[in-house]
Image (cartoon, rainbow, N blue to C red):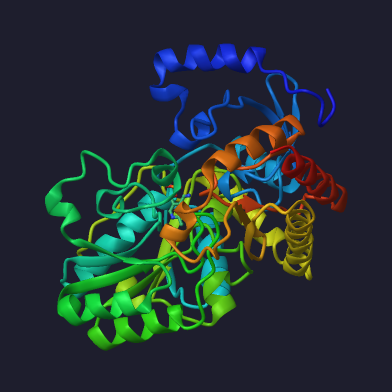
């Protein structure tokens, strides 16, 4: 069936009913349930380039991009080849392989602040492990995070987090012990004053500040000028560590991550998503003297049966090598700017209040009169308008995150025609809501 014809969902509906009997909510990760928009979730059958086909035969231009990893789109031949070749040699050894060195060298070379790196299996594991390392290294317990910042679902970080918890209205989760939550302090994103107050009061006990250098789990919110430098200065002043969670921004906002884009060197960095080329992966790295506190060199323990998995390393390394192509990030930027400008023009033409935030190939559109700079302003956007808009976009064959608190990702596979088609659909949707 062609893009934009009425969406069929007979098979997806049946699959969802079946799934709900054996999987909580029918899904393995909450946002996939489409519960925010109240629609039947999509069951993907296959993807190619910028397009996804579902089990009912509907075709969509995809801006979810597996929530960030697919900077090269779906089933990029070089990545599939790398996975196939690696798989033929064995899927896991639990021993070291040469590919892990290549991966580590690539990351150390391209991420300005990373001197050593440890591979793990998800972004959650990366930030959880970075926290343990920061606490072990500083011998302090308190961490500071930002409201609406999502760093995975480790206990200490599931406090006023964004992503699925924003969509589901779960500011906290039952099951997080009070004693753990007590060591996590939060500040509004982009408010250096709040951070300053926390440090004045608790500075000597703060092990680390963890931040998404470009917030991406309450929609996209760029850091205000001075925020990242302010965090760098204050953590240095108090002997705390600065952790950049670049799980989403690493290799996304630029080849050197947000740290390259804004010229700020954190002590530790979390990575994930793109560096796995679509396979499960995470990593944390940073200053050599800190990283050498991890076992087996140091006493801070962290391990993983499948860490540095040969398939994930092969896929990730292939994906990273493809990013070296000259002009690639400029092209991503150009296409995403074209999309954002199209959305802005549509908003102007139709008189619908829309705030467009964009950094590189990350973009969000909030139905709001007000500039979106933090969690409160993001949550102030009109969710009912979003729902109506979302249903129409899906009908028109445009697949974006089914919640306003997640980001749209443009990949190298998106063509100018894709972008133009999306802008046209967006205009039609705005007219109809
Ligand atoms: N940190 C950030 C900034 C993220 O965006 C995410 C996932 N969206 C995570 C951590 C958690 O990664 P994972 O889902 O791979 O555990």
258 or 42: which is nearer to us?
A: 42
Where does the image place residue 416, in percent across and percent down from the top left?
86, 53
Q: Quadrant of the N terminus?
A: top right
Q: How many marks?
A: 0
Nearer the observer, 119 or 240: 240
User: Which residue is at 54% across, 69% downward?
Assistant: 222
Where is residue 202? Give x, y as percent. 16, 76
Q: Residue furthest front?
A: 351
The percent position of residue 11, horizontal first and vertical second, equals 64, 13
The answer to which of 429 and 275 lies nearer the viewer is: 429
Q: Residue at x 75, y 25 (%)?
A: 58
Quadrant of the rendering where the C terminus is positioned: top right
- Asked whether residue 296 is in view, the answer is no
Up-down relation of residue 23 to residue 297 (above or below): above
Side of 171 where 330 appears, left or right: right
Quadrant for residue 355, please give it.
Answer: bottom right
**Res 24 visible:** yes
Outermost residue on the right side: it is 417
Residue at left offset 19%, top offset 54%: 181
Indicate left or right for 86 with 212 as reference: right
Residue 95 at x, y = what percent? 41, 48
């Amino acid at each position: 069936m062609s893009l934009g014809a009425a969406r069929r969902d007979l098979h997806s509906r049946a699959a969802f009913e079946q799934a709900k009997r054996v999987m909580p909510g029918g899904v393995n990760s909450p946002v996939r349930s489409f519960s925010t928009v109240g629609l039947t979730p999509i069951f993907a059958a296959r993807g190619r380039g910028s397009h996804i086909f579902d089990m009912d035969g509907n075709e969509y231009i995809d801006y979810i991009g597996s929530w960030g990893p697919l900077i090269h789109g779906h089933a990029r031949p070089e990545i599939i080849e790398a996975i196939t070749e690696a798989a033929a040699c064995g899927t896991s050894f639990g021993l070291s392989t040469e590919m892990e060195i290549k991966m580590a060298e690539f990351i150390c070379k391209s991420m300005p602040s990373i001197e050593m790196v440890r591979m793990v299996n998800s972004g959650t594991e990366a930030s959880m492990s970075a926290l343990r390392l920061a606490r072990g290294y500083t011998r302090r317990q308190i961490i500071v995070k930002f409201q609406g910042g999502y760093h995975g679902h480790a206990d200490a970080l599931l406090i006023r987090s964004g992503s699925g918890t924003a969509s589901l209205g779960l500011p906290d989760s039952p099951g997080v012990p009070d004693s753990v939550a007590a060591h996590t302090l939060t500040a509004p994103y982009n408010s250096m004053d709040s951070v300053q107050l926390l440090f004045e009061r608790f500075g000597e006990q703060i092990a680390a500040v963890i931040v998404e250098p470009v917030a991406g789990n309450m929609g996209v919110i760029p850091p205000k000028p001075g925020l990242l430098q302010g965090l760098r200065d204050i953590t240095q002043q108090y002997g705390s560590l600065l952790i950049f969670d670049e799980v989403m921004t690493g290799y996304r906002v630029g080849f050197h991550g947000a740290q390259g884009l804004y010229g700020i060197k954190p002590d530790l960095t979390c990575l994930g998503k793109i560096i796995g080329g679509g396979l499960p992966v995470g990593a944390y790295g940073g200053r050599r003297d800190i990283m050498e506190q991890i076992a087996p060199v140091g006493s801070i323990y962290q391990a993983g049966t499948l860490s540095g998995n040969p398939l994930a390393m092969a896929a990730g390394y292939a994906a990273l090598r493809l990013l070296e192509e000259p002009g690639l990030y400029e092209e991503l930027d150009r296409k995403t700017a074209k999309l954002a400008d199209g959305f802005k023009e549509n908003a102007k033409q139709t008189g619908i209040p829309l705030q467009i935030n964009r950094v590189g190939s990350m973009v969000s559109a909030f139905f709001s009169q007000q500039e979106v700079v933090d969690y409160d302003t993001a949550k102030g956007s009109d969710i009912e308008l979003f729902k109506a808009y979302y249903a129409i976009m899906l009908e028109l064959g445009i697949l974006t995150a089914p919640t306003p608190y997640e980001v749209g990702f443009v990949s190298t596979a998106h063509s100018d025609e894709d972008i133009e088609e999306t802008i046209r659909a967006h205009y039609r949707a705005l007219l109809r809501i």
